[in-house]
Amino acid sequence: MEKVLDIQNLHAAFSIQKKDYEVLHDISFSINRNETVCVVGESGCGKSVTTLCIMQLLPKNGKIQSGSIYVDGTDLTKLSKKEVRKFRGKKMGMIFQEPMTALNPLLTIGFQLRENIINHRGASKKEANAIAIEYLKKVGIANPEQRLKQYPFQLSGGLRQRVLIAMVLSAQPDLLIADEPTTALDVTIQKQVLSLLNDLKKDMNAGILFITHDLGVVAEIADRVVVLYAGRKVEEGTTHQIFKNPLHPYTIGLMNAVPNVDLDEFEIRPIPGTFPNITEKIDGCRFNPRCPHASSCPKCFETAPEMIEAEPGHFVACHLKK
């Protein structure tokens, strides 16, 4: 299968008071065409930093230390800023998590859509207008000609998110990155957006990197799942493997933290302890302070576990699984 994204041994760090602190450690995974890969984990685990590395949008104090990020066979870490700007949007596009603020409030929907299409597809203003209408229809927006004349404040959150999706897709990228795009939406609109992304992925033969902390969304949209903890990949597998046979104690903790609301009585079982700060030094497995099994395994406090293939396509980094 053709890979649209291939990340190999990615290391990234943030500089705080002139000292570098690693936020991503040896991250590797890939996405094929017509495939959705969900990256999951608690806030601070490295999900959004991964997307910023791919888009080459890290803040000034952030940097990629080593590793490669291939999109359609091109290593983005080797491109200049000017080359990345040309690449971004045309080959890869990103839907941000806050539709209420992602659009410019002073410009019409039509102006923002046309500008994006002209920049990335070299279309004339007339052609861009026709393409904008076409993509608004594709994302299920009625009366697209009228919507083009409106400003963002005249649209609901769900409609704004659809406009953002239309804007990204109108450039026809091969890789679509969605950073928690349904967080600010109610459940009904969330379902519609997820269904829309699934349909458009097949229609455009693109790959989707979907960032979320919501395991319900993962079950709905993912083909494969990558679990991150404290900037490290701890498990990867198909959606079926991760949900039916989670192997890493952290993945199991995430599953157990989701209450079963179908039961008359249910309890919420959070993972004990707190998420580590990036400045906090932890020897061995980063999860050992919160792991219920670490006390019986001295290795967990001595060396970081390596990724192993527990079953075909199912990988885990845990001393207890060797």
Image (cartoon, grey):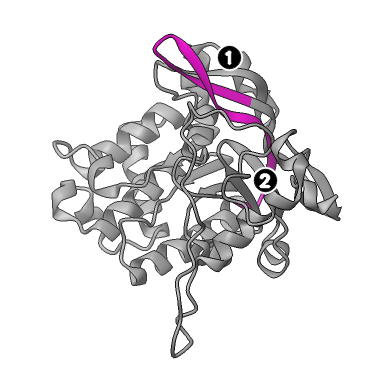
Report the predominant secondary structure element of the magenta stretch: strand
Q: In the picture provided, is 153 more to the left or to the right than 6?
A: left
Residue drawn at x 37%, y 38% is: 127
List x then y, in percent, for residue 174.
59, 40
The correct choice, above or below, for 193 with respect to 181 in the image is below
List x then y, in percent, for residue 244.
70, 70
Residue 206 visible within the image: no
Residue drawn at x 31%, y 66% is: 186
Q: Dot 1 lies on which element?
A: loop
Residue 29 visible within the image: yes
Q: Are marks 1 and 2 in contact (CB under 8 Å)?
A: no
- Nearest the camera: 81 or 318? 318
Q: Amino acid at mark 1?
A: Leu
Stretch of the chain drawn in magenta: 11-38
Q: Amino acid at mark 2?
A: Val
Which residue matches tag 1? 79
Q: CA distance from mark 1 to mark 2?
A: 30 Å
Q: Earlier in the sequence, mark 1 or mark 2?
A: 1
The correct choice, above or below, for 137 with respect to 151 in the image is below
Q: Is residue 25 magenta?
A: yes
Which residue matches tag 2? 234
Which is in the foreground here, disc 1 or disc 2? 2
Label 1 crowd (10 A; few <14 / some 14-19 / many >=20): few
Residue drawn at x 47%, y 38% is: 48
List x then y, in percent, for residue 60.
39, 16
Q: Dot 2 lies on which element?
A: strand
